[in-house]
Amino acid sequence: MFVWSHYETVFDYANKVEEIGKREELMSGPSFWDNSDKAQQIVLELKSLRSIVEPLRQAIQSCDDLTELTSMIDEEPAVAGEVEPEVGKLEKAVEQLELKALLNGPMDECGAILSVHAREGGLDANDWAEMLLGMYISWAQKNGFTAELVDRSDNEGAGITQATVIIRGPSAYGYLKGEEGIHRLVRISPYNAESKRQTSFGAVDVSPEVDDTVEVEINEKDIREDVYRASGAGGQHVNKTSSAIRLTHIPTGIVAQCQSDRSQHKNRAQAWKMLRARLARVEEEKREAAQATKYQNKTITGFGSQIRNYFLHPDQRVKDSRTGHQIGNFHAAMDGEIQGFLEAFLKYRMVSETSKE
C-alpha cells in the first residue's frame, strides 16, 4: 500500500493547501485587479500550486476508494471487477506525481525565457528556427501555459534570425530547461531548386524568469545599451522610431534584447528582466556544476553536437540524442506534441544524477 504521508511531505501538501487559501482570499478582494501585474502573478502562483495539490488530492481519494473496494470483495465478489481499473487509475496518478517530484530545482517553478537562434544551414536554418519557435508556442498553448513573444528578428529571405518568447505556467522552466542546445533538421530543402537534402541547425537557449526577490548582482558599468529600430515584416508594421533595446553584459557576452512594445521604456525594462534571468541561469549552472555550454560559446553546431534530431527525409521521425526517446511523426512534434521528450529528459536527468552519487 502506498504511504501517502511520504508524498504529502515531498510536496509540502499542507503548506500548499494553506497557500492556495491565501491566494483565493486575495483574489476575492474588490481591489485585486487594481494592480494587473501583481494580480497576474498571483493567478500564476495559484495555478502552479493547484497543479500539484489537485493530483495529489485525487490520488489520495483514489487510494481510499481502492482500499474500500478491496475490503468489500469477501462480502460482494462482484466488486472485484472494479479493482483493476481503479488500480490503473491510481498507478497513473502516482506516475504523474513522481514526475512532478522531479521538478525540484531551485528555479523550476519559474516561467521560462526561451530564445531560438538560426545557426548553420542558410535559409533552411532561418526557416527551421521559425518552426522551432512555433513548436514551443504550440506546446505552451496545448498545455495551459501562456506564451508572450518579446523579440523577433525576421530574416529577409525566409524565417527568422532569432526570437525570444516568455512561457509562463506551472514549472514552465523546469519542463523546458532541458530543451537548451542544438536542434538538427534533415529534409528535402524547399529553397533548393534541385530538391537536394539539406541539414540545418537551430540553437535553443532557456533561462528562468526571475522576479525581484532573486538577487542577481549586475554592475551597470558592465552593461552596453544599444537602441535601434524594431524589425518587422515591412509596410505599416515597421517601427519609425528607435524603440528596440539591446543590452550586452560585457564580462560574459550575454545579450538580452526586446522590441515587442512601442515604448522604449517598457522594452528597456523587459530587456533588463531578461538579462537578469540569463545571469541567474549562469549562476544556477555553477551551483549544479553543470558542464553545459551557454549559447554565446556554442561555436560548434555541426554533426554530433545536437541534443535532438528531426527527420523529414528519408523517413519521418524525431529522436532525442540524450534519452533515446523518439516518435515517428515529425508534424506532431511541430504541432507541440513534445511532452514525451520533456518528461523523458526529466527522468534521464534523475538517473544521471543518481549514478554520480
Image: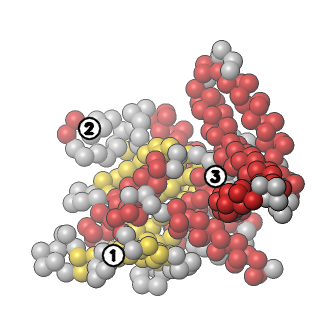
Res 165 seen here: no
- Give the quadrant of the C terminus: bottom right
Secondary structure of the residue carrying tag 2 is helix
Q: In this view, does 118 lie to the left or right of 10?
A: left
Where residue 263 appears, as percent x and y from the top left, is: 43, 32
Q: Which residue is drawn at 52% across and 61% down?
A: 339
Instruction: Say which residue label 2 marks.
Output: 237
Q: Which of 202 and 104 is in front in this view?
A: 104
Extreme residue toward the bottom, this view = 304
Instruction: Please tell me the numbered disc located at residue 155.
Output: none
Whether the residues at callouts 1 and 3 have beta carbons within 8 Å, the answer is no
In space, the residues marked 1 and 3 are separated at their CA atoms by 30 Å
Residue topped by disc 3: 171
The Cα atoms of the two marked residues, 2 and 1, are separated by 37 Å
Taking depth in this image into account, of 210 and 329 the one nearest to the observer is 329
Q: Which of the two labelled residues, at mark 3 and mark 2, occupies the earlier sequence position?
A: 3
Considering the numbered disc 3 on the image, is that residue within a helix, a strand or a loop? loop
Residue 146 x, y percent position in the rendering: 50, 43
For label 1, count other residues whose C-alpha is less than 10 Å away and answer few (under 14), some (14-19) or many (20+).
Answer: some
Q: Give the residue type that dot 3 points to.
A: Ser
**Relative to 303, residue 272 above or below:** above
Whether residue 286 is situated above or below residue 195 in the rendered picture: above
State which mark lies toward you, 2 or 1. Answer: 1
Residue 146 seen in render: yes
The type of residue carrying mark 1 is Gln
Quarter of the figure that contains the N terminus = bottom right
The residue labelled by disc 1 is 316
> Is tag 1's residue or tag 3's residue first in the polypeptide sequence?
3
